[in-house]
Image (cartoon, rainbow, N blue to C red):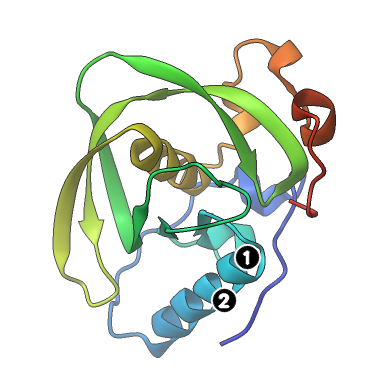
């Protein structure tokens, strides 16, 4: 278990579609997940995708209770989501500010479905699904985009709503 280097926008691995997990009993999967949690915690992230630490597998983690980067946000349960499928529940989309550990110091106003159902597997290979809204739905969509080689700036509709956090919001950044 260790904090890993987070790849930054421009690294070619971040543009690739990640491979599905096929062996839930591989000890490397447990190590990957532990490293992802260590890295997310060390960087005060709300989520992390395996490709962000250089592993092209369809694995994301997310969860937030209290976090200095998201002081007024609803809690999201700590989750391991492997081989995810996202289904929008309705056409309603909401724009919200996003940042990313792979795009440090930047923020952008990104449209996301406000209500989704997601399904996949936990670290033991047990299938589950959840129906979620708002910030929880945003986090899941953001992390799962990484599995398809999509970074949030690619979804911004108006580039005037993309820039450095300090300039956009008058806040200092903590490196991301």
Q: Position of residue 160 (x, y in %)?
A: 75, 12
Q: Is residue 54 visible?
A: no
**Residue picked out by circle 2:** 38
> Would you say 1 lies left or right of 172 here?
left
Up-down: is 55 above or below 131?
below
Q: Where is residue 13 in the image (x, y as percent from the top left)?
A: 65, 53
Graded by Cα atoms within 10 Å as few (under 14), some (14 to 19) or many (20 or more), the crowding at tag 1 reads many
Reading the chain from its start, which is encountered first: label 1 or label 2? Answer: 2
> Would you say 165 lies left or right of 40 here?
right
Q: Image point 40% across, 37% down: which residue?
A: 135
Q: Is residue 137 visible?
A: yes
Can you tell which of label 1 and label 2 is closer to the viewer? 2
Q: What element carries label 1?
A: helix
Up-down: is 101 above or below 96?
below
Which quadrant is home to the N terminus? bottom right
Q: Is mark 2 on a helix, strand or loop?
A: helix
Up-down: is 102 above or below 51?
above
Residue 53, numbered circle: 1
156 or 74: nearer the eye? 74
98 or 11: nearer the eye? 98
> Would you say 36 lies left or right of 130 here?
right
Q: Position of residue 70 (x, y in %)?
A: 56, 46
> Would you say 56 lies left or right of 61 here?
right
């Amino acid at each position: 278990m260790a904090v890993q280097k987070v790849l930054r926008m421009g690294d070619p691995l971040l543009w690739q579609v990640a491979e599905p997990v096929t062996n839930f009993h591989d000890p490397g999967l447990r190590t990957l997940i532990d490293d992802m949690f260590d890295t997310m915690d060390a960087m005060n992230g709300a989520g992390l995708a395996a490709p962000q630490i250089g592993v092209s597998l369809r694995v994301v983690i997310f969860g937030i209770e209290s976090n200095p980067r998201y002081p007024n946000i609803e809690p999201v349960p700590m989750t391991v989501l492997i081989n995810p499928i996202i289904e929008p529940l309705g056409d309603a989309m909401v724009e919200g500010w996003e940042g990313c550990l792979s795009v440090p110091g930047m923020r952008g106003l990104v449209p996301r479905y406000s209500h989704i159902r997601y399904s996949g597997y936990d670290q033991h290979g047990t299938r589950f699904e959840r129906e979620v809204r708002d910030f929880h739905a945003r986090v899941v969509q953001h992390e799962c985009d990484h599995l398809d080689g999509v970074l949030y700036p690619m979804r911004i509709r108006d580039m005037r709503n993309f820039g450095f956090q300090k300039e956009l919001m008058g806040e200092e950044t903590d490196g991301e």
